[in-house]
Amino acid sequence: MHQMNSATEQSLLPPWVPLTYSIAFVLKHVRILGWSLMLVAATGFLTWLGYIEALDFINGLTGHFFQQPPESTGFLGWFVVKGWLVLKYLFFIVIRIVAFYLAFLVAYCLTAPGYVFLSTATEKTYLGEAFELDDGFTLKGVVTDVIEGCKIGALGILVTIAALFANFIPVVGQVVVLLIYTFYSALMFVDYPASRNRWSLGRKVGWVRDYYKRSFRLGIFPALVSMVPIINIFFMAFLFPLFTVHTTLNFIAIEQRR
């Protein structure tokens, strides 16, 4: 009897759609692949343009930082100079991460309707006749998607500020930053399939919280990629459509079992 109950409980658990299946799904369906490539080009261009502008703006505000090294006198002075160098390079990296996220958030908001369309196309292709029809691609829907994207973007600014301060806490701070960006990345992707159902931002955050293990798996790789300066622009632009499809498939799997 106990074994039957365990088997029943396991069958009720939402299945996990592996990334390999999502990759094959994109490559198999020409329409989804074509739309993904268009979004790659748009996201990459907007992120690169925004990154240059954001970096120039931040450098204009902080360019005078770390211009003059401290005076080095004696043994203690050597440690002071080395500590100054460590802070200088850490600041250099953090500034570029912040510039990337600011640029990417702008690109995210502007391309939100396109990714919602990609998510909807994924859901429609995957479910087939079981797909529930909605109002389709309308002007009102586009405006709503942009507004929802801006809400996530505004939350992303708060997340970036929190991560900036947490990053200065040795060891623990870096772990906290990774967790912050992991769950925020998951929220960004969940926004697309959830927006089709017109979920509020609070409900989306609640979904990430309720399925935190799944959300961690969905967000960890994009979070790691986003923290590598320069490379993150190209990789995130390339991977974002794929992870939109990947998250949508897992979102469907979970929602069907609810």
Image: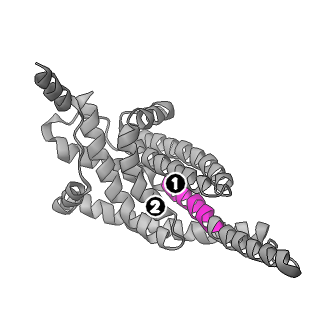
**Vertical placement of residue 68 versus 8, above or below:** below
Q: Is residue 195 left or right of residue 18?
A: right
Q: Position of residue 59 (x, y in %)?
A: 73, 71
Q: Which residue is mark 2?
A: 224
* Mark 2 in CB contact with mark 1 (< 8 angstroms): yes
Q: Is residue 208 visible?
A: yes
Question: Image quarter for residue 253?
Answer: top left
- The answer to whether residue 42 is magenta is no
Q: Residues within 10 Å of mark 2 (few under 14, many from 20)?
A: few
Between 235 and 88, the residue placed more toward the observer is: 88
**Vertical placement of residue 112 versus 23, above or below:** above
Residue type at tag 2: Leu
Q: Position of residue 227 (x, y in %)?
A: 52, 63
- The answer to which of marks 2 and 1 sits earlier in the sequence is 1
Q: Residues within 10 Å of mark 1 (few under 14, many from 20)?
A: some
Residue under the point 32% across and 61% down:
36
Q: Is residue 169 left or right of residue 2?
A: right
Q: Residue furthest top?
A: 1
The disc placed on residue 178 is 1
Q: Position of residue 257 (x, y in %)?
A: 23, 30
Q: Magenta: predominant secondary structure element?
A: helix
Q: Is residue 68 visible?
A: no
Residue under the point 50% across and 46% down:
149
Q: Is residue 6 left or right of residue 97?
A: left
Callout 2: SS: helix
Residue under the point 65% across and 58% down:
170
Total of numbered circles in the picture? Answer: 2
Residue type at tag 1: Leu
Q: CA distance from mark 2 to mark 1?
A: 7 Å
Magenta-highlighted residues? 95-110
Residue under the point 24% across and 35% down:
14
Q: Position of residue 246 (x, y in %)?
A: 29, 51
